[in-house]
Amino acid sequence: MNQLHSLTNKSTITQDKLLTCIRELQKPGPVYTPAPLIQQIPHLIRYRKGDPADAHELLIALINDTSESISQIFQGQMSSTVQCSHCNKTTTTTDNTQDISLHIAMDSSTSLEEKLYDFFQPETLEGENTYWCDTCQESCRATKTLSYTHIPTILIVHLKRLILGKKIQNHTPFDTTLEMEPYMTPGHAVSQKMKLIGIISHQETKEHGHYVAITNRGNEWTSYNDAITTQTTLTHLHQSQACVLMYRKMEKPRQNGRKMTSFRGGMAKLGAGVDNELGGSAPHQCR
Ligand SMILES: [Zn+2]
């Protein structure tokens, strides 16, 4: 973890509390309550005690409030190209993203790969979404296409299970590897395989919701359910109702890989450590 500190350019209060929390979570021993980090949370997201929580929103808020060196691990770059159907002129804008948010339909169990494919399909802008074309000087029908110009070292995929306080229970099949090349901007596209390193799943009882993290190290998968840490299996992983999945580039990162693995596992555990007591919003890629 000291090497992780050396990677950071400017430490933030959130980052210090986060790193303390990760160090404590990695130690064997009695249950650790991350009180200093929890006290920091109201500063990061909207918070009213009793509101439904969203582990994904907290995760993105934490990433955005750490140093640039850490947040860059999760930062990708996506371009949006809009082509006017009247004059055919294209306009491209590029934005940084920390994640992809994918909708889950109530009556569908399409796989993560299919949802990703749909996300990057051209979208027709018409009706209420009509595009204002500066060349035509009028609202025009247009086509919008998203693509990655840079895939982050760790890709966060958010499955939107909680809609207006209601949970969509459908199982979404996912693979432990992803090939991102089809979703990259032409000219930037190279084979980019990603490997699943952790998920946050949401469990629901009559009384409350609850987050559980499952992380990967080597061939082992470990479930973190509050104070209960157990080895688990790929079968169990695939049966879970994942709401956040983290994929890492399969190429070895330039930074120290072993230390970064510890940090990644800690981030997934932290995301799951939020019970349904927190709520709020943070910027993320969603359409
Ligand atoms: Zn036009």
Image (spheres, grey):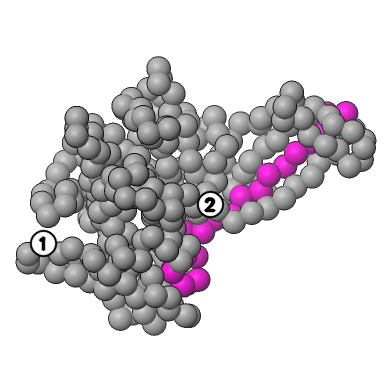
Neighbourhood count class around disc 2 (C-alpha, 10 Å): few under 14, some 14–19, many 20 upward = few
Which residue is found at the position 72% from the left and 27% from the top? 128
The residues colored magenta run: 66-86
Q: Is residue 250 visible in the rendered structure shown here?
A: no
Mark 1 lies on a secondary structure that is: loop
When asked about the image quadrant of residue 87, the answer is: top right
Which residue is found at the position 56% from the left and 50% from the top? 190
* Place of residue 146 in the rendered image (x, y in percent of width and height, measured from the top left): 63, 41
Which of 12/124 is in front? Answer: 12
**Residue beneath disc 2:** 283
* Place of residue 192 in the rendered image (x, y in percent of width and height, measured from the top left): 49, 49
Q: Is residue 51 visible in the rendered structure shown here?
A: yes
When asked about the image quadrant of residue 60, the answer is: bottom left
Which of 62/142 is in front? Answer: 62
**Residue beneath disc 1:** 31
Extreme residue toward the top, this view:
107
Q: Is residue 70 magenta?
A: yes
Mark 2 lies on a secondary structure that is: loop
Extreme residue toward the right, this view:
136
Asked if residue 18 is positioned above or below residue 171 in the image, the reply reads below
* Place of residue 77 in the rendered image (x, y in percent of width and height, measured from the top left): 59, 54
